[in-house]
Image (cartoon, rainbow, N blue to C red):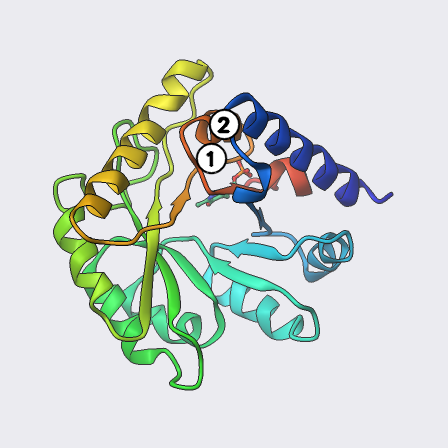
């Protein structure tokens, strides 16, 4: 076994254990392998070990990898900050975008999505309490924004995403994930059909799964520590 395939097995075992502890089915939780900064060969190794969904953060780097790996059966997720003048190559290549926090970016992705491709799956990124990054819309703005995004023709609004501040206490880890789940419940009661909670990373995926994550985004635990930029 390569180190990457061993790491993948270990992460899948963590997901399985967390699902069991929460009385959930591990099949209802997708593992997204976050491959930012890692070369295409690392993605090849993970794909050879059975990994299907990969996440990238930077437009240029991510698009280069998509183009280099078209021979592989991979589902590509864009999860990094996205400026409205950089949307076209993402709309043309990716299957999902998790990091939408402004209507302008969503409108451009919808306009630029090629007509022969299925609608782009998207998540609204929400800045829940104690958020590490400055991206993400506010809890207050989320309902109106979600409704507007759901009406765009070439997008399919699948759910919500968050990146909470890294903390060690499991109860504190769960709080923002619970807020995101409750927000999704409110939006679904208001008529949306969200089926995705994109939350949980290497250090807090157990807490996210306990609060209902349907997709965990894991980089370090699969590929190792990233070099500091
Ligand atoms: C880098 C990144 C991850 C993965 O983080 P790890 O701690 O390496 O698992 C997940 N989500 C987003 C949005 C990221 O930028």
Helix, strand or loop under label 1: loop
- Closest to the observer: 154 or 223? 154
Q: Position of residue 111 (x, y in %)?
A: 28, 79
Task: Identify the residue at horizontal 72%, vertical 57% (top origin).
Answer: 47
Q: Position of residue 193 (x, y in %)?
A: 29, 54
Q: Position of residue 136 (x, y in %)?
A: 27, 45
- Res 29 visible: no
Find disc 2 in the rendering and name its residue.
Answer: 204
Q: Is residue 86 left or right of residue 24?
A: left
Task: Identify the residue at horizontal 56%, vertical 33% (top origin).
Answer: 202
Mark 2, other Cα within 10 Å: few <14 / some 14–19 / many ≥20? many
- Res 86 visible: yes
Mark 1, other Cα within 10 Å: few <14 / some 14–19 / many ≥20? many
**Disc 2 beta carbon < 8 A from ligand 1?**
no
**Disc 1 beta carbon < 8 A from ligand 1?**
no
Q: Which mark is residue 76?
A: none
Screen quadrant of the N terminus:
top right
Find disc 1 in the rendering and name its residue.
Answer: 200
Q: Is residue 173 left or right of residue 60?
A: left
- Closest to the observer: 97 or 36? 97
Q: Are marks 2 and 1 in contact (CB under 8 Å)?
A: yes
- Closest to the observer: 72 or 34? 72
Q: Position of residue 178 (x, y in %)?
A: 32, 28
Helix, strand or loop under label 2: loop
Q: Is residue 11 left or right of residue 133?
A: right
């Amino acid at each position: 076994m390569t180190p990457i395939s061993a790491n993948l097995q270990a992460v899948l075992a963590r997901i399985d254990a967390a699902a069991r502890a929460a009385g959930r089915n591990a099949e209802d939780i997708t593992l997204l392998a976050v491959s930012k900064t890692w070369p295409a060969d690392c993605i090849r190794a993970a794909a050879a070990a059975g990994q299907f969904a990969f996440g990238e953060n930077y437009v240029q780097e991510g698009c280069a990898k998509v183009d280099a790996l078209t021979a592989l059966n991979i589902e590509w997720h864009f999860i990094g900050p996205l400026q409205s003048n950089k949307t076209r190559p993402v709309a043309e290549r990716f299957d999902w975008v998790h990091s939408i926090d402004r209507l302008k970016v969503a409108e451009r992705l919808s306009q630029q999505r090629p007509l022969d491709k299925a609608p782009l799956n998207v998540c609204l990124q929400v800045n829940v309490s104690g958020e590490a990054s400055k991206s993400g819309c506010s809890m207050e703005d989320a309902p109106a924004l979600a409704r507007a995004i759901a009406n765009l023709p070439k997008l399919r609004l699948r759910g919500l995403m968050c990146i909470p501040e890294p903390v060690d206490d499991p109860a504190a880890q769960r709080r923002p994930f619970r807020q995101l789940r409750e927000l999704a419940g409110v939006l679904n009661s208001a008529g949306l059909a969200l089926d995705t909670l994109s939350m949980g990373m290497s250090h807090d995926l157990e807490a996210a799964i306990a609060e209902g994550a349907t997709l965990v985004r894991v980089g370090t635990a699969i590929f190792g520590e990233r070099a500091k930029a």
